[in-house]
Every structure is written in structure tokens, then in C-alpha cells.
Amino acid sequence: MNDKMFSLLVGIFSILSTIQFLIFDLNEVIILDYEDQFSIYMDANPGIGSWVLIHKRNISTGLSTFTIMVSFLLLYCSHTRNYVGLLCYALWIVAYELTSFSIVLLINKHIKEQFKELGYMHLIFQISRMLLHFLCLPFIIKYMYTLFKAPKTSSKMGRHRPSSLSTSNYSGSGAELGTLYRKLN
């Protein structure tokens, strides 16, 4: 498998993985009994953890949407052999995964004791996704470096073909030149 194909597969994986985790985040049940309003999270006290908990859906939606757009940029730039999109993807994935990991850690502090296993599950999902994204980054960076170092070629140079007729070896009469002229036109 060449670097271009691997970059395309990483882009597709990134899109599908991001959509999957967005669905998990948006459909997470935080209230178990609608009559008693029993929440899996502790009461919010002022701080960044409670703010993240309150705005988790908006943060998750924004991060995921931007990640999907950057993944499509990766696919496009891999196809057109443009290294800038690969650089943007590599930088964004690192920022996205570190931000998502921080959010998971902040939210896990607010989970009630009875539901700590749910927090461990969030951590396992997050760490596995981080590992998959980070293990693909060296291949993306290698392909980006290859594209960056590749010599720029002109499109007209690739289309130039040498003539099949050689004028230096041709020693014919004028009648033969007229026949040759009609064949070429």
C-alpha cells in the first residue's frame, strides 16, 4: 500500500470515527429516571468542569464538525497531491484529540460514584481513538514530506514526445518529401 492510499484510508477512518463518537456524545443518557430526575453527574459547582459539562453537546458538535471538514481536506489534498492539507490535518488531529481527552478527564471528575465504570468506558474509548489517530500520523507526515520534497514539474514537459522522423537521417528526393508532407497533414 502506497502513502497516498494510506492517507485516503486515514481520512475515511477519521470521518467515520468522528461521526461515530459524535453520535455517542449526542445520544448519551445523563438522566435515568425522568420522574425523579436522577442524574449520573454530581451537582454542578462553579468551575471549568461544570461549564464543560453544561456545554458538552455544543463543544462536541463543534469539534466534530471541524474535524470532519479537516478530514475531507485531507482526502482532497491527498488526491491532488497538496502537502498543505496534510499538514493542517496532522496539526488539527493532535489538537482535537488532546482537547477531547481533556474534556473526558474534566467530565469524569463529575460522575457520581455509582457510575464510575461509565467514566472508565469513556476513557477507554478516548484512548483507543487517540492511539488509532496518533499511530497513523507518522505515515501522513511521511507522505506530506514526500510531497513537499517532490520536484515541481511542468505539465507541458510531461506531454512532449520526440518526433518519430529524423531529418538528419533522411536523404530523399523532392518527390518523396511531397509524399511525406501529405502523409503528415
Image (cartoon, rainbow, N blue to C red):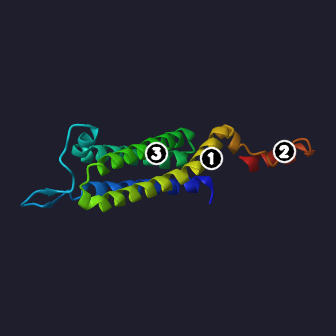
For the residues marked 2 and 1, what is the alpha-carbon distance in whole angstroms? 55 Å
For the residues marked 1 and 3, what is the alpha-carbon distance in whole angstroms? 16 Å
**In the rendered image, which residue does mark 2 sit on?**
177
Q: Where's residue 78, x and y in %?
A: 54, 48
Q: Residues within 10 Å of mark 1 (few under 14, many from 20)?
A: few
Instruction: Indicate the secondary structure of the residue bearing disc 3.
Output: helix
Identity of the residue drawn at 79% across and 45% down: 163
**In the rendered image, which residue does mark 1 sit on?**
142
Identity of the residue drawn at 54% across and 54% down: 135
**Front in this rendered view, residue 176 or 92:** 92
Q: Where's residue 5, x and y in %?
A: 57, 56
For the residues marked 3 and 2, what is the alpha-carbon distance in whole angstroms? 66 Å
Q: Nearer the viewer, mark 3 or mark 2?
A: 3
**Front in this rendered view, residue 18 or 46:** 46
Are discs 1 and 3 less than 8 Å apart at CB?
Answer: no
Instruction: Indicate the secondary structure of the residue bearing disc 1.
Output: helix
Q: Where's residue 7, x and y in %?
A: 54, 52
Label ID, residue 93: 3
**Front in this rendered view, residue 77 or 115:** 115
Q: Amino acid at mark 1?
A: Lys
